[in-house]
Structures are given as structure tokens and as C-alpha cells.
Amino acid sequence: MIELAYADNGTAAAGGGLMGMIPFVLMLLVMWFLMIRPQQQAEKKRRQMVAELKKGDRVLLASGFYGRVVQAGEHIVKVDLGKGLVVEVAANAVSAKIDENHNETTKTDDAA
């Protein structure tokens, strides 16, 4: 009815510990190359873009405002939002540099 459980002498488990870790290590490597590494490269590219900002560049801020750089510093950037409204923002608030030839027009349905 009920079988007795006998403890193994441990000889088979000695080499299994290292072999059991291999799938876990492989999973970490795949996660590194698919998720973490591309994010680090994108952040490096964004930091380089912020470091290369100069007066007159058109930028998109994280808040959604577009403006022109008036003065660019290491940590603070002064941006003209239009009609003489100049704001100081953290350099990290600059999301993108906008190309001068790039026209962003939003198409909306006028079916109202």
C-alpha cells in the first residue's frame, strides 16, 4: 500500500547542480541581449544627442512642447517655446531633436 522512501546516497546529485544552472544562465544571457542591451544603446544615443545640442536646434520636450534651443548647458537647456517665452528645462527633458525639413502634421477625421 504505502511504499517506503529511501534517501539516495547523493552520488547522482553532485554533477546535477552545475547542469541545472545552465538553463538559468542561458535565460539571463538571452534577456540581456533582447531587452537590456538595446535599451542601453538607445539611452547612449539619446545622451549623445543631448550633448550635441546647440543654439537654434528645434527640439521636442518630454512634456510634448516643441521649441528652439536658446542656450545649451550640461544640465540645463533654455528653450524658446514661441513669442519670447523662454523656459529652463533639465537636459534630460529633451526627448528628441527635430529635423528642420520634417513637417509633422496630424491628420484628423472631420466627419463631425
Image (cartoon, rainbow, N blue to C red):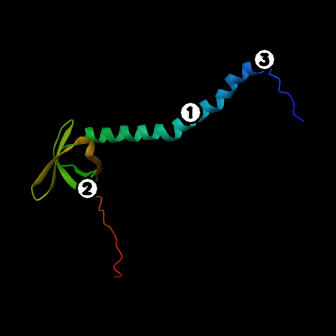
- Residue at screen point 78% across, 17% down: 11
Judging by the rendered image, the residue that carries numbered circle 2 is 100
Q: Amino acid at mark 1?
A: Leu
Q: In the picture provided, is 9 more to the left or to the right than 20?
A: right
**Front disc: 2 or 1:** 1
Q: Amino acid at mark 3?
A: Thr
Query: Residue 11, which numbered label?
Result: 3
Residue 89 coordinates in the image, percent (x, y):
19, 45
Query: Could you say whether the residue bearing mark 3 is in a helix, strand or loop?
Result: loop
Q: Is residue 107 above or below residue 72?
A: below
Q: In the picture provided, is 17 more to the left or to the right than 2?
A: left
Q: Amino acid at mark 2?
A: Glu
Q: In the picture provided, is 7 more to the left or to the right than 81?
A: right
Residue lying furthest left: 84
Mark 2 or 1, nearer chain start: 1
Judging by the rendered image, the residue that carries numbered circle 1 is 29
**Residues at badges 1 and 3 in contact (C-beta under 8 Å)?**
no
Nearest the eye: 69 or 56: 69
Nearest the eye: 111 or 24: 24
Residue 79 coordinates in the image, percent (x, y):
17, 49
Tag count: 3
- Residue at screen point 36% across, 40% down: 45
